[in-house]
Image: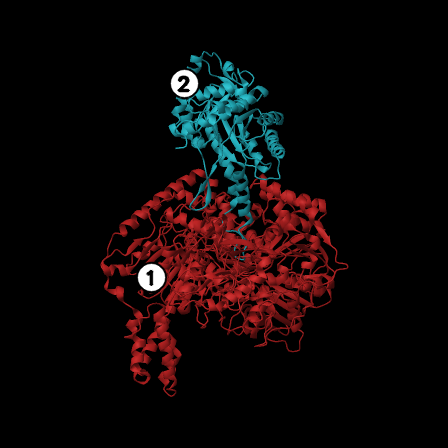
């Protein structure tokens, strides 16, 4: 069966690709991913904080660490610092030269500012598309949800203004009204939405009384939430949707596609099992869809979304009640 | 010739731009104030900028100026065009090679930012004592007085030397010219080509040593030949002045700027004339013109070519009408009949008269000294000298610029005499080194220089502190040329960028009536008036100042610029000074911001530009009408209970009135009291630590890591708490060694620099609110008064009984620090070691301190951080030079031993009279530890009593004077890696090779910190530093391993932030080893490029990644058959790159060239592993004891 489909206006051989991660940090891994059949390569995010920090760090060094009578600087000419993000661009160029599949660059930020210029630089460096990761934890109690959304949409507009590239926005979980927000993204000029991003998650160190941040690999348990929102959003938007997080097996990928995704990004399982797992996923995806009797991807994508699924209530709140009724306390519970 | 570019640069850049284009080999060694020239050349070569012949000059940093001179000497013999830059002691280290280079008639130019040679004190500032020490080398000495001249005469020197074959020392006043920014016309490559003849370059190359046409140079000659051969070069020196003049003429023809060997300025029939050279001549120029315009028959001869001295040209320059001449020397030659230029002028006039070059009565010549160590030289002083010449009997020898109430040589100066053109903008800005004021002002003069036809001048004065340094910028703009190479005395614009400076300094002293005042105020500008000190309010009224105010920090914070208020204050200046139309000025600032930060990134540009816009909304005119001067008066400069010398002298220096102190105020031999830093209350921290006794675990780590001894621990009898000020915090001490005791951690609120290190290392967290630690940073201002009182009470609490103190990390902090409140950088990594040294051994410590950061924060006036205990004992400290510290320290050891041996001999002789038992006890005392020291001191006291009963015995009198020498002294040789690894290595190696009891503490910052971060041989592989911008490609020299190879040297490598217990052990072991000891101490530095509050963590990473392995090599272990080497840090637990990536010095290599970074990193990892493998093997090797290991010279000489 032909697995090819359009995602963000790009024609992909199939929907599977490695998501933004350190996997694409060196050329060797990138080539291995392509050899394993990746439909596209997504580079690790360049973070707003990183860009701003590098710029301010460079400026701080240009300003000097305090001028003294015998020295007005303590390091050699510090203009080189501004090249921090340039390294990303150089890497992007190298990856692009090394592989035939589309290379998608990724930018992570949530406030307006000088860092969005890097979107344009990524375009110039040859990115086929751009992921904009709107990851943030809103901690300001004075900023209401609408204000958060406005701010994020401003960022999207700013990036949109900077590039002509296909632009996919990677969303955090926890929007009050994800469907509405995705619609607004459409208005702001996005071409796609990715559900959902994953950040570092906190853990508490009981001895040192410190909070630590650590990446948590995704598990299949992360999938259902994505399925729900893909299903709810896909009927109401023209954006290309992608599923990111929770896909570990081919059947997971099929579910994501049926819920409405046009692309499926995998990271954790590849980090665990290596790039070749991608080959297996692709092969099994094809077998699975064949077995299920599908003939084209257009039949698959969104076939079980909110509009087309037999019983939409199972995506909606009602299914919570049903589940409760179906749940029985067993004998050994509480032991 | 209008096509040349106008640029605003300082003297160093003006000169370097010529030297770099005309050189092939540049061998240098950093020394203030010449380092800028070398750094620029290095930067340009790193960027691939080529010289006139299309090659990139090879810039090589050497291990000393002696090395640089040797390298250029070799390069010249090899036929290359070579140059170097230096000053002061550096120049003196080049002397032997200079004689050689001149003796061999090698074309060569060195550029010297003339600086004081250290005598009774070191000084980084400008005078010509260094150049004057070179008069006999055979070099031509060519002097410039301004950045424009320095550029032009640099070319003249390079062009002339090729033809004349006389090497040139081109010099200009350090700081005053090297660091003065001026708008100059830049010489184009074609100008250089026009003056530098290719045929002469080729000739120079043909003289190169080559096996293809072998010759021999550098013979050893005998009495039969040397003299004649020496005279054989005469004709070259004789011809030189004419060659110089030809080059000057050629330059003049191209540029319109005409120079002579001697340039006359003034009345054509002048009767009174000054002769001088350098920047002072520019001041004199302006003053003479002013006086001539008012009918005075005065003039000035500017000396440009001082050597060879052209008598004829001098005679021609001096008008025949001159009756009296005053020669001014910016140097001092004690004991000479007159200073050098003065002598030369007298000799020249005498000869001119004899040769008939001048007719009539010879003029009367007097001479004086001015401007030593950068002392101001202004028009009033010029006038004072000219006035002296109208006296019936002018003083033959004088000084000007000081008050000499001892030998009464000084001339009176009229303080009100001022000639400054009132059309000029004269702006003075007070700021801090850290707030960007100087950078903004440099930008401002570039803007004004570039946007107007006006001349522009910028000069920046820094105090000698490394933390909280105060900067005063002096900017002049106006119709040119501006020749005022002196500070602004009457400003029509004064800005104070740091409000607190108004409390400590007479910021408005230089404001002229009606001037504009700009204040950066904390909080609402409208409320600023009431916060002004009363003295400032009065000055504002008296001088009718127009006051503007802005909360610049608020604006900068809001724009995301942190404490960088430079763009904000610069905008204010343009908005209210009227120096440019407002709109034009703002556009220029924004453009300048975009240009300055373009390569840093849009975000920085955006934030600064937003700050500019926000500034205009927040700048307000402060209405003074209807106000009253009822602010709080300024606090006294020093507390009322300060000692007399501090009140009389130190306080004047602190108040900025040092210039007004007379000669009699000063010790004549450079001897100063220690422990005066405690009287200087700088209040530079906006936040200080606050102690929560309930959370504290009493580990004392905060006190240990504090670079400034500004947070301290005491355990003391509870009874001592009587009379404690309110709020004084105290808890029960959790330890038994002192008996039941109370315990306090106390901050010195006015001495803390707010670095935050104490909070970072504090391990104690409030378990209910872990963000709150036993110490937290809190705003200083509201707590200042209360904490000041508490700190005073704390200081008066009894000190711990030194014998009862357990010598562990906690216990050591109960020992009184005798190194406190230095001017070191906030977060300095060197000072915790020095403080520990002073705590452990301070009452018997002699320190020889190599020049560098530690000598600057350790001994730079106005105040001294090395202190005394309650018995009046404390470290005795001296700085000799940079290069000789090991030898100097050895000398101190030898002398200490000589005194002790003499005392022991006398005591042996006097034993029957003072008591055999006492004498035997004194002579046999082992003095181990605090108890031993105390007991020996008690015996010495008993000895004194016994000696007092023998008043007629000359031996007894002599022994009484030497009795304290019977108590063993510990001699420590302290310095940085620049000293120990590079310039002083030869001496250090030699001193270690002896078996003398000296302890060497190397404060290893892995870079030349004091002069601004140039690489040393201690710089680790992969780190970027000046002269290693691409990342150092060679490994760090293993000084410790070298020292171990002697076998008898105690060697330790320590990192106090990583493993303080090991550091403490190493210090005590080193001190107790009666042979040489070497302790190499990891010292985080601002040159590493990270927030030093995190330096303890970074030290841990350094140790755990094996970047900085810890070990102790103790020769005593041989005696028990154990391997001397013990490695104190385990196998690497952290990846080296995780340590490196935290520091900008490594990160910038990665940013510049990731591939190179990866290679360097891999190489560094291999090297670290190799080094560790060597240590591990060594740590298994037991070495047979050497018989000489037990040798103790002091005892040997006594026996």
Residue B1044, image quadrant: bottom left
Is residue B26 visible in the rendered image? The answer is no
For the point 39% across and 87% down, the residue is: B951
Image height of B288 relative to A324, above or below: below
Q: Residue at 48% x, 17% y: name it.
A: A4
Secondary structure beneath dot 1 equals helix
User: Is the residue under label 1 in contact with that under label 2 (CB below 8 Å)?
Assistant: no
| For residue B797, above or below residue B688 | below
Q: Which residue bears the numbered disc 2?
A: A284
Residue B295, numbered label = none
Q: In this view, does B195 lie above or below B911?
A: above
- Chain B as rendered: colour: red
Label 1 marks which chain's residue? B
Name the colour assigned to chain A in the rendering: cyan
Q: Quadrant of the N terminus of chain A?
A: top left
Q: Are marks 2 and 1 on the same chain?
A: no
The percent coordinates of residue B854 (x first, y second) are 46, 60
On the image, the x and y values in percent for residue B338 come to 54, 72
Which label belongs to residue B1069? 1
């Amino acid at each position: 069966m032909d697995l090819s489909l359009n995602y963000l206006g790009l024609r992909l051989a199939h929907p599977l690709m490695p998501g933004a991660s350190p996997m694409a940090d060196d050329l060797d891994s990138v080539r291995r991913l392509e050899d394993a059949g990746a439909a596209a390569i997504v580079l690790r995010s360049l973070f707003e904080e990183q860009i701003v920090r590098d710029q301010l760090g460079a400026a701080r060094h240009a300003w000097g660490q305090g001028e003294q009578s015998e020295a007005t600087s303590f390091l050699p000419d510090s203009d080189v610092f501004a090249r921090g993000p340039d390294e990303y661009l150089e890497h992007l160029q190298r990856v692009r030269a090394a592989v035939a599949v589309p290379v998608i660059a990724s930018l992570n930020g949530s406030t307006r500012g000088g860092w969005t210029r890097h979107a344009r630089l990524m375009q110039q460096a040859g990115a086929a598309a751009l992921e904009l990761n709107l990851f943030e934890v809103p901690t300001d109690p004075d900023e209401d949800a609408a204000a958060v959304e406005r701010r994020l949409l401003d960022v999207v507009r700013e990036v949109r203004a900077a590039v002509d590239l296909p632009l996919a926005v990677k969303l955090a979980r926890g929007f009050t009204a994800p469907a509405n927000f995705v619609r607004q993204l459409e208005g702001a000029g996005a071409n796609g939405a990715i559900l959902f991003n994953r950040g570092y998650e906190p853990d508490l160190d009981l001895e040192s009384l410190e909070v630590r941040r650590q990446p948590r690999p995704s598990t299949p348990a992360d999938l259902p939430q994505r399925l729900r929102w893909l299903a709810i959003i896909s009927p109401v938007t023209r954006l290309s949707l992608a599923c990111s997080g929770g896909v570990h097996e081919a059947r997971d990928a099929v579910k994501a596609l049926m819920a409405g995704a046009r692309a499926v990004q995998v990271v954790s399982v590849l980090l665990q099992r290596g790039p070749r797992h991608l080959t297996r996923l692709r092969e099994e995806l094809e077998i699975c869809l064949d077995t299920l009797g599908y003939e084209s991807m257009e039949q698959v994508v969104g076939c079980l979304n909110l509009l087309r699924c037999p019983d939409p209530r199972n995506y909606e709140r009602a299914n919570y009640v049903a589940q409760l009724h179906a749940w029985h306390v067993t004998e050994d519970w509480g032991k | 010739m209008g096509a040349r570019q106008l640029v605003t640069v300082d003297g160093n850049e003006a000169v370097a731009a010529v030297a770099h284009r005309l050189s092939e080999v540049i061998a240098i060694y950093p020394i203030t104030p010449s380092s800028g020239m070398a750094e620029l050349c290095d930067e340009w070569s790193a960027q691939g900028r080529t010289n006139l012949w299309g090659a990139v000059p090879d810039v090589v940093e050497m291990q000393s100026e002696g090395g640089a001179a040797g390298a250029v000497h070799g390069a010249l013999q090899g036929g290359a065009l070579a140059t170097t830059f230096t000053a002061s002691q550096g120049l003196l280290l080049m002397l032997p090679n200079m004689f050689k280079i001149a003796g061999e008639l090698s074309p060569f130019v060195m550029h010297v930012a003339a600086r004081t040679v250290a005598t009774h004190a070191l000084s980084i500032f400008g005078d010509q004592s260094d150049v004057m020490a070179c008069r006999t080398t055979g070099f031509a000495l060519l002097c410039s007085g301004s950045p424009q001249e320095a550029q032009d005469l640099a070319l003249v020197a390079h062009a002339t030397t090729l033809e004349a074959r006389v090497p040139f020392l081109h010099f200009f006043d350090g700081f005053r010219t090297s660091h003065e920014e001026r708008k100059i016309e830049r010489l184009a490559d074609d100008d250089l080509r026009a003056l530098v003849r290719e045929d002469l370059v080729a000739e120079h190359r043909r003289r190169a040593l080559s096996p293809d046409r072998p010759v021999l140079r550098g013979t050893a000659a005998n009495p039969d030949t040397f003299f004649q051969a020496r005279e054989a070069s005469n004709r070259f020196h004789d011809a030189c002045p004419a060659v110089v003049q030809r080059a000057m003429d050629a330059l003049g023809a191209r540029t319109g700027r005409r120079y002579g060997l001697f340039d006359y300025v003034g009345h054509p029939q002048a009767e009174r004339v000054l002769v001088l050279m350098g920047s002072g001549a520019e001041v004199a120029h302006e003053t003479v013109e002013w006086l001539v315009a008012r009918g005075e028959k005065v003039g000035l001869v500017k000396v440009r070519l001082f050597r060879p001295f052209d008598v004829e040209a001098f005679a021609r320059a001096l008008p025949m009408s001159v009756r009296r001449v005053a020669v001014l020397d910016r140097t001092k030659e004690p004991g000479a009949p007159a200073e050098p230029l003065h002598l030369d002028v007298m000799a020249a006039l005498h000869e001119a008269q004899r040769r008939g070059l001048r007719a009539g009565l010879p003029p009367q010549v007097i001479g004086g000294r001015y401007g030593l160590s950068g002392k101001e030289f202004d028009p009033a002083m010029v006038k004072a000298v000219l006035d002296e010449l109208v006296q019936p009997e002018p003083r033959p020898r004088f000084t000007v610029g000081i008050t000499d109430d001892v030998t009464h040589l000084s001339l009176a100066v009229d303080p009100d005499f001022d000639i400054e053109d009132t059309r000029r903008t004269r702006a003075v800005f007070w700021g801090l080194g850290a707030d960007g004021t100087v950078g903004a002002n440099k930008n401002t003069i570039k803007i004004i220089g570039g946007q107007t036809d006006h001349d522009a001048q910028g000069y920046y004065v820094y105090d000698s502190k490394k933390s909280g340094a105060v900067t005063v910028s002096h900017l002049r703009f106006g119709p040119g040329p501006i020749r005022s190479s002196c500070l602004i005395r009457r400003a029509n614009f004064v800005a104070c960028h740091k409000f607190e400076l108004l409390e400590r300094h007479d910021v408005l002293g230089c404001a002229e009536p009606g001037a504009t005042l700009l204040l950066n105020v904390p909080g609402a500008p409208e409320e600023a008036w009431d916060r002004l000190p009363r003295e400032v309010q009065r000055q504002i009224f008296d001088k009718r100042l127009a006051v503007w105010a802005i909360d610049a920090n608020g604006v900068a914070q809001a724009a995301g610029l942190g404490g960088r208020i430079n763009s904000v204050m610069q905008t204010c200046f343009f908005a209210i000074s009227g120096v440019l139309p407002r709109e034009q000025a703002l556009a220029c600032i924004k453009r300048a911001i975009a240009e300055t930060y373009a390569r840093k990134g849009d975000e920085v540009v955006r934030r600064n530009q937003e700050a500019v816009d926000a500034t205009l909304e927040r700048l307000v005119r402060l209405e003074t009408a209807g106000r009253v001067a009822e602010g709080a008066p300024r606090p006294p400069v020093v507390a009322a209970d300060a000692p007399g010398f501090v009140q009389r002298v130190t306080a004047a220096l602190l108040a900025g009135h040092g210039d007004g102190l007379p000669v009699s105020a000063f010790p004549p031999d450079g001897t100063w009291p220690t422990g005066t830093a405690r009287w200087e209350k700088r209040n530079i921290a906006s936040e200080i630590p606050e102690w929560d006794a309930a959370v504290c675990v009493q580990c004392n780590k905060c006190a240990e890591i504090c670079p400034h001894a500004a947070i301290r621990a005491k355990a003391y009898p509870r009874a001592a708490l009587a009379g404690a000020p309110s709020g004084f915090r105290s808890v029960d001490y959790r330890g038994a060694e002192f008996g039941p005791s109370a315990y306090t951690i106390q901050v010195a609120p006015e001495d803390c620099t707010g670095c935050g290190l104490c909070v970072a290392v504090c391990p104690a967290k409030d378990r209910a609110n872990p963000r709150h630690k036993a110490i937290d940073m809190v705003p200083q201002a509201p707590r200042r008064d209360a904490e000041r009182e508490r700190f005073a009470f704390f200081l008066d609490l009894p000190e711990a009984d030194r014998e009862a103190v357990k010598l562990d990390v906690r216990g050591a902090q109960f020992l009184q620090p005798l190194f406190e409140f230095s001017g070191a950088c906030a977060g300095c990594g060197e000072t915790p070691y020095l403080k520990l040294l002073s705590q452990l051994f301070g009452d018997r410590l002699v320190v020889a301190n190599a020049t560098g950061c530690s000598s600057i924060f350790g001994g730079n006036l106005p105040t001294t951080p090395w202190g005394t205990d309650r018995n009046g004992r404390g470290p005795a400290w001296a700085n000799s030079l940079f290069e000789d510290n090991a030898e100097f320290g050895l000398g101190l050891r030898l002398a200490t031993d000589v005194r002790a041996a003499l005392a022991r001999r006398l005591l042996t002789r006097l034993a029957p009279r003072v008591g055999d038992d006492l004498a035997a006890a004194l002579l046999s005392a082992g003095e181990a530890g605090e108890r031993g020291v105390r007991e020996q001191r008690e015996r010495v006291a008993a000895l004194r009593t016994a000696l007092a009963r023998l008043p007629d015995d000359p031996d007894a009198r002599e022994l009484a004077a030497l009795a304290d020498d019977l108590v063993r002294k510990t001699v420590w040789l302290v310095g940085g890696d620049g000293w120990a690894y590079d310039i002083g290595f030869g001496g250090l190696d030699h001193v270690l090779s002896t078996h003398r009891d000296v302890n060497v503490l190397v404060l290893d910052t892995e870079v030349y910190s004091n002069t601004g971060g140039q690489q040393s041989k201690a710089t680790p592989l992969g780190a970027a530093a000046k002269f290693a911008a691409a990342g150092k490609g060679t490994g760090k020299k293993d000084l410790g391993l070298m020292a171990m190879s002697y076998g008898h040297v105690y060697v330790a490598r320590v990192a106090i932030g990583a493993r303080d217990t090991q550091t403490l052990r190493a210090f005590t072991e080193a001190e107790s080893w009666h042979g040489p000891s070497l302790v190499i101490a990891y010292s985080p530095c601002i040159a590493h490029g990270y927030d030093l509050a995190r330096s303890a963590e970074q030290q841990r990473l350094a140790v755990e990644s094996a970047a900085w392995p810890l070990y102790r090599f103790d020769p005593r272990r041989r005696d028990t058959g154990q391997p001397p080497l013990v490695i104190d840090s385990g196998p690497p637990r952290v990846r080296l790159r995780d340590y490196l990536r935290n520091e900008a010095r490594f990160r910038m290599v990665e940013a510049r060239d990731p591939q190179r970074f990866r290679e360097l990193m891999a190489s560094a990892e291999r090297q670290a592993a190799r080094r560790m493998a060597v240590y591990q093997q060594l740590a298994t090797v037991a070495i047979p004891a050497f018989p000489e290991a037990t040798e103790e010279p002091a005892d040997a000489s006594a026996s």
